[in-house]
Amino acid sequence: MTSSVDFFQVIEERRSVKAYDASHKMNKEDIVDLLEVTQKAPSSWNLQQWKFFVIDEQDQKDKLLSIAYGQKQVVESSVTIAILGDLEANKNAEIIYGEALAQGRISSEIKDRLVGQINGAYSNAQVARDEAFLNASLAGMQLMLAARAKGYDTCPMGGFNKQAFVEQFEIPSRYVPVMLVVVGKAAKPGYPSSRFSIDDVTVWNQF
Amino acid sequence: MTSSVDFFQVIEERRSVKAYDASHKMNKEDIVDLLEVTQKAPSSWNLQQWKFFVIDEQDQKDKLLSIAYGQKQVVESSVTIAILGDLEANKNAEIIYGEALAQGRISSEIKDRLVGQINGAYSNAQVARDEAFLNASLAGMQLMLAARAKGYDTCPMGGFNKQAFVEQFEIPSRYVPVMLVVVGKAAKPGYPSSRFSIDDVTVWNQF
């Protein structure tokens, strides 16, 4: 089981790590444990607009290398978890609210209203895409922190050929690649990167 | 200072809370402390594509109520932090990589290459928008967890009139509202919500 680890230490220690111990393996159970924590992230209407495409087999990692412009962390880390955003997450609404209705947690009127509201929102392709990026990224952040809490290092990667990724791995059109997160054991530590001051990124009550 | 709190307990205890103790106030220092933790989130090219629009004055909260379709958590919570995504975050590249150059951390060739790459990516409006949603949401997740770790409750809200929000608060066109996060002390506990199984949301190595 998981031992106790301080939240703020996890925040401080999470760095974007680029060099990994290629001999370190994570087994399926380790990865599932990580996704179980990730999956507790919130999402719009609880539709869980994410799909985890796990790449941990050597031949699939090798295919990813050129797609990621030769960035070696995709082959040297233990696993790459591609976080895909679900562009048709409204299809989950019947499942989620149907279950809530069956369990007596909501009325059929509320279920119908929610499903109608969701389908209305998803009829706008830009809204669907925004929701895919938003919610997949909530999961992405939770994944990176959970990995650090379990003693792993990570690097989020947006720098890859998304078109080639979709073609190579035959990603269904329902999903859009949002980010890759590599997970493993650091071979070299990550460096703290600079940040703007809070004054630079905050506006109080009015622009 | 911050006392120790277990990471996994924070994950478990973070719930979307809708009922708040309206008498609980957070002072500016409390809010800045929270944003300091939030600000450690990673971002694409370290451009920090987020802006925190903090609404904690009563008259501004009152204006938010109808924009949020009457959802009372925006007036009863201690503060609403609107997380805006920066559609023109490429403008940060000169600042960030100029500083890195000045400190001798990168060469001028690397700086120029990065700034060029970033400006190229941002010339595509959809990429700029995707990056705004992605990175603002990384900050949003970190904010919600940091708040729980500091003893507060939160609720992420996407259900608000974005057009009215932009007009009412005169949000510059550089920014897109991504989500509201209300922060405060729960008056009633949040409920755990259901999740899909890991099998439902995971694909291993190939679709």
Image (spheres, coloured by chain):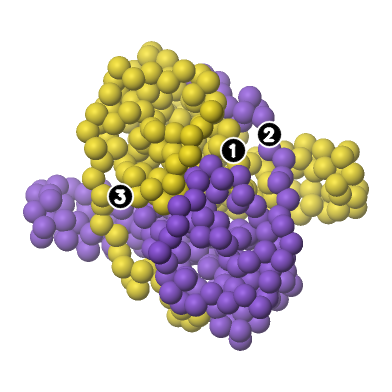
Chain colours: A purple, B yellow
- Do the residues bearing badges 3 and 1 touch, measured as CB atoms within 8 Å? no
Amino acid type for the residue under numbered disc 3: Trp
Amino acid type for the residue under numbered disc 1: Gln
Which residue is identified by label 1?
A: B39
Pointer 3 and pointer 2 on the same chain: yes
Pointer 3 and pointer 1 on the same chain: no
- As drawn, is A143 to the left or to the right of A72? left
- Residue farthest to the bottom? A59
Instruction: Give the vertical position of A72 relative to B35 (above or below).
Output: below
> Residue B33: x and y, percent?
54, 28
> Residue B72: x and y, percent?
26, 27
Q: Chain of mark 1?
A: B
> Residue B102: x and y, percent?
88, 38
Give the Cα distance between marks 2 and 1: 8 Å
Amino acid type for the residue under numbered disc 2: Phe
- As drawn, is B119 to the left or to the right of A89? right
- Do the residues bearing badges 3 and 2 touch, measured as CB atoms within 8 Å? no
Task: Tell me if I can see residue B132 in this picture.
Answer: no
Closer to the observer: label 3 or label 2?
Answer: 2
